[in-house]
Amino acid sequence: MSGFKLAIDGPAGSGKSTISSQIAKKLNWIHIDTGAMYRAVTLKAIELGVDLEDEKAYQFLESVKVHYQANKIYLDDRDVTEDIRSDAVTQNVSLVSSFPYVRQKLVQLQKQAALEGNIVMDGRDIGTVVIPHADVKIFLTATLEERAKRRQKENAQKGKTSQLEKVIKDLSVRDQKDSTRKESPLIMAEDAIIIDTSYLTIEEVVDKIIEVTRKKERNHGD
Ligand code: DC
C-alpha cells in the first residue's frame, strides 16, 4: 500500500461526501465516495426489476462494473451520478447494503481502489473494515435535526420541497438500519477522531481535517 490514506466515516447527512470531495480537491488527492457505489448497485437492481429482498438477485455484480472516478459514479461505462440520488434509491440503499454478498463485492473493489496513491475515502466502514490501517480516521457526527435541515436544503436546491419531520424520520430510519445491520455496521473505529459538524461550516471542517492530516504527514517524515 503506498500513499496517504484518509478514512472518513459517519451517518447520513454528516457532510462526509462534500467534505471529502473538497479535501481531495485542495490536496489534489483521489476521492472515493463508497456510498455512491452502494447506491449504484441499488439503482441497477431497481432497473433490472429483481426482488430487492433476495440476496441472490445481486449476482449481476459478477458482470456489471461499479466504478467511482473523478466525482462520478459509473455502472459499466454509464454515468449514473444523478440517477443514484433518486428517492427510490435512497429508500432502498440501506437494505441493499445490508447483504453480505453485496458488501463483500464492494469492499473488495474499495480495498483495491485504496491501494495506490493518496486517497480520501468516505463511507460507514472505511476506518473499521475497508482501510483499517488508514493513516488518519475521522468520524463525522451532527445532530439528527441539523443533518435533516441540511438534507432539506439540498432537496430545495434541487427544486424539491420536503417536510422537516419527514426528513428527520427518514434519516433516523436509515441511521437505525445502517448501525444495526450484522455485516460491518456503522460504528466508530477506536482510533478515530470525532468531529461534531453541527455548528461548523464545511470550510471549518475541511480545514480541521487537513490540519490533522498535515500533522500526521509531518510526523511520518520524522
Ligand atoms: O453516504 P450515502 O448516504 O450516500 O450512503 C448510502 C447508503 O450506503 C447508506 O445508507 C449506507 C450504505 N453505505 C454502507 O453501508 N457502507 C459504506 N461504506 C457507504 C455507504
Image (spheres, helix red, strand yellow):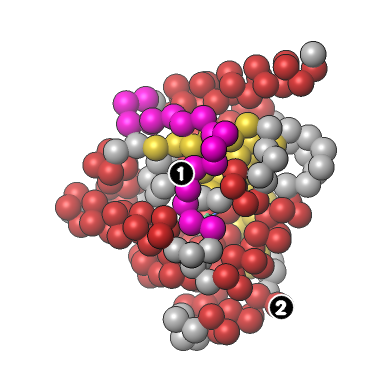
Q: Is residue 89 visible?
A: no
Q: Secondary structure at mark 1?
A: loop
**Which labelled disc corresponds to residue 10?**
1
Q: Secondary structure at mark 2?
A: loop
Name the residue beneath numbered marker 2.
Answer: 63
- The x, y position of residue 109, in whole percent, is 70, 60
Q: How many marks?
A: 2
- The x, y position of residue 188, in whole percent, is 49, 42
Task: Give the number of the mark in front: 2 or 1.
Answer: 1
Answer above or below: position of 14 versus 81: above
- Say which residue appears at 37% left-offset and 25% top-offset: 200
Q: Is residue 47 left or right of residue 70?
A: left
- The x, y position of residue 50, in whole percent, is 50, 86
- Say which residue appears at 55% left-offset and 26% top-offset: 209
- Say which residue appears at 29% left-offset and 54% top-offset: 172
Q: Is residue 91 left or right of residue 186?
A: left
Q: Mark 1: which amino acid?
A: Gly
Q: Is mark 2 within 8 Å of ligand 1?
A: no
Mark 1 surroundings within 10 Å by alpha-carbon count, few (fewer than 14), some (14 through 19), many (20 or more): many
- Residue 87 appears in which quarter of the rendering? bottom left
- Residue 26 appears in which quarter of the rendering? top right
State the extent of the magenta-drawn residues as a range. Answer: 184-200
Secondary structure mostly taken by the magenta-highlighted segment of the chain? loop
Q: Mark 2: which amino acid?
A: Ser
Quadrant for the N terminus in the image: top right
- Distance between the Cα atoms at labels 2 and 1? 30 Å
- The x, y position of residue 164, in whole percent, is 19, 49
